[in-house]
Image: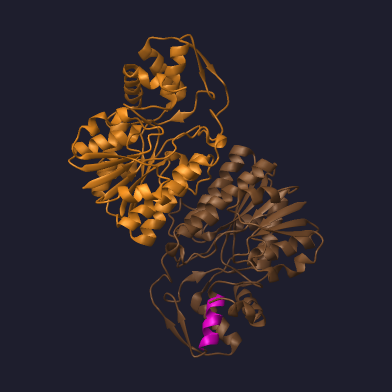
Chain colours: A brown, B orange
């Protein structure tokens, strides 16, 4: 089958592209290279089953052209930066919601009817049930990012109902692993390279998170697409465990052989809309036969090792 | 206080404008008159506390200009037609979601921080709990309309969290009463005027709905704004009772003295995305001291009487 992968040059996208190609699929990668990196597609570019389209999800014409012969769309492109939503209030809506409508409309015009959508555990807002199941109480959004992803999910659902699409909505925790290029491990490593003696953490460091390795995430996505047959499948992807930000800092500094003074800026949340506890119930995806192979600590360490081996990633950004 | 009411010339908007003016408030009405009617604002136009701005919620500049001196925004403008979402897939997103971001951004720029948002019971999709409480299980959207309103709610929530707004989200059932200009009573009356002998119903007629009178809705909105103090207040507005479409048809034909042959097109839903059962839990708004004064049958009859007395409404449309 031919897949269209939006955000193909991103962290998650490029990992999925490699997996799809290894599985014998054809892949059209779609990326505007605003945050994606051609380096991540080096292996794919050498594969005869891969083609890259440089296009923007806000460009309906380019999207329409890319749909030819496609059987399944993995729509991963979007703004992934939760933290600066309030600095650019239109960005999340444009890149995560309007872009999703554009993808769905291009699919409809081309007769493509299967879509996997990269959503987020952030759609639960500040959950009241832990671990949080897919049918948790009606969430209250606390970030523009969560709001825009919830809206994207809602569009996928409405297209499943209204146009007979088959939709998959994946609500991820934070993903770690090779090609990771933003998030706490990235930030901490950059800070420690600038000053190995002192590390500042946003919040009180006790925020609890459940990071998942990108290989486990990719495995879950492909398995769900293969096995789930409902018109709409909504799946949490996460760990059955969680750690604190301070745990993660401990693993990182130990791995680096550093012992910096830790300074926490204080407060339960690292920033407005930060969620002090993300812990998703993964029974649904496990019932399809999936289990993660990498624990949280191993995922943090794998990320750190990859970043250390690829310092250009750390240097390329301001 | 000065209110900005978007959709001021609409059914619900014009009723709220009259109530606000009667309560001694100043009102800036904002409407593009695409579905709103100047006739509905005849009384308001004669009131010194009212000013109408002809503007579109997709026009950020006009919105910004209208915000001067405003203390509270009632954002009611939007596409209210659930049924034809799949015919115009971008319309709901533009008019209900992007427009809401525009309103919030214009408010932020002008330092206005209180907003009431007209949402809908449709955000529950096909609910699994009845009566449906505000914290019902995470909904699955079945219409582009519901999806776009859910997204609008999510934006209001994110602005409450991110920018210190005070937000009110009102999830309405279908509203009836004077100035009603679309929906089942309107459709049935038009059909019966064309052919008093036969009436066709979409679906099996057993869809259950809980219609609310616009006066009761307006009362609830004003009371909530006055009494609720939380950063974000989400309120169902509906009846503690429900009827079937066939009940409503019986009341309408009895009131008109007609006995048409009833033909149901069949199926549990009248159209794609139609919800066969809408029945909201109203304990939250009742706890603030509200109770509806009009029953469902009385609301249907009041609507019918108003339409009968204002036949131009029925004739003005295709």
Total number of numbered labels? 0
Q: Residue at x 34, y 17 (%)?
A: B308
Q: Is residue A181 above or below residue B250?
A: below
Magenta residues, start to end: A185-195
Where residue B249 sits in the image (x, y, percent)? 43, 19
- Give yes or no for residue A64 being in the magenta stretch: no
Rendered location of residue B223, percent (x, y): 25, 43
> Can you see residue A52?
yes
Q: Quadrant of residue A21?
A: bottom right
Between B211 and B304, the one lying in front of the other is B304
Whether residue A23 is situated above or below residue A316 in the rendered picture = above
Q: Nearer the viewer, residue A316 or A23?
A: A316
The reply to whether residue B136 is visible in this rendering is no
Residue B102 appears at what percent x and percent y? Answer: 41, 50
- Say left or right for B238 vs A229: left
Q: Position of residue B19 (x, y in %)?
A: 23, 36
- Side of B66 relative to A27 (left or right): left
Tell me which residue sits at (76%, 47%) in the image: A69
């Amino acid at each position: 089958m031919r897949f269209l992968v939006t955000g193909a040059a991103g962290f998650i996208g490029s990992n999925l592209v490699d997996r799809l190609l290894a599985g014998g699929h054809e892949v059209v990668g779609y990326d505007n290279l605003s945050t994606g990196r051609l380096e991540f597609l080096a292996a794919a570019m050498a594969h005869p089953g891969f083609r890259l389209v440089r296009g923007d999800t806000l460009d309906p014409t380019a999207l329409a052209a890319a749909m030819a012969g496609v059987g399944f769309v993995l729509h991963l492109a979007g703004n992934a930066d939760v933290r600066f939503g309030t600095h650019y209030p239109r960005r999340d809506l444009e890149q995560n919601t309007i872009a999703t409508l554009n993808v769905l409309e291009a699919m409809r015009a081309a007769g493509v009817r299967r879509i996997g959508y990269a959503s987020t555990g952030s759609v639960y807002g500040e959950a009241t049930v832990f671990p949080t199941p897919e049918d948790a109480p009606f969430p209250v959004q606390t970030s523009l990012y969560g709001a825009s992803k919830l809206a994207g999910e809602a569009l996928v659902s409405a297209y499943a109902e209204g146009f007979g699409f088959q939709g998959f909505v994946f609500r991820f925790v934070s993903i770690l692993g090779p090609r990771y290029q933003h998030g706490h491990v990235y930030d901490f490593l950059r800070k420690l390279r600038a000053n190995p003696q002192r590390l500042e953490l946003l919040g009180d460091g006790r925020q609890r998170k459940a990071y998942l390795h990108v290989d486990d995430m990719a495995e879950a996505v492909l398995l769900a697409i293969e096995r789930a047959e409902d018109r709409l499948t909504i799946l949490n992807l996460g760990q059955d465990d969680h750690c604190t930000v301070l745990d993660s800092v401990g693993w990182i500094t130990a791995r680096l052989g550093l012992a910096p003074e830790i300074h926490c800026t204080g407060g339960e949340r690292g920033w407005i809309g930060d969620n002090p506890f993300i812990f998703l119930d993964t029974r649904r995806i496990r019932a399809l036969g999936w289990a993660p192979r990498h624990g949280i600590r191993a995922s943090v360490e794998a990320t750190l090792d990859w970043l250390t081996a690829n310092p250009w990633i750390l240097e390329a950004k301001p």
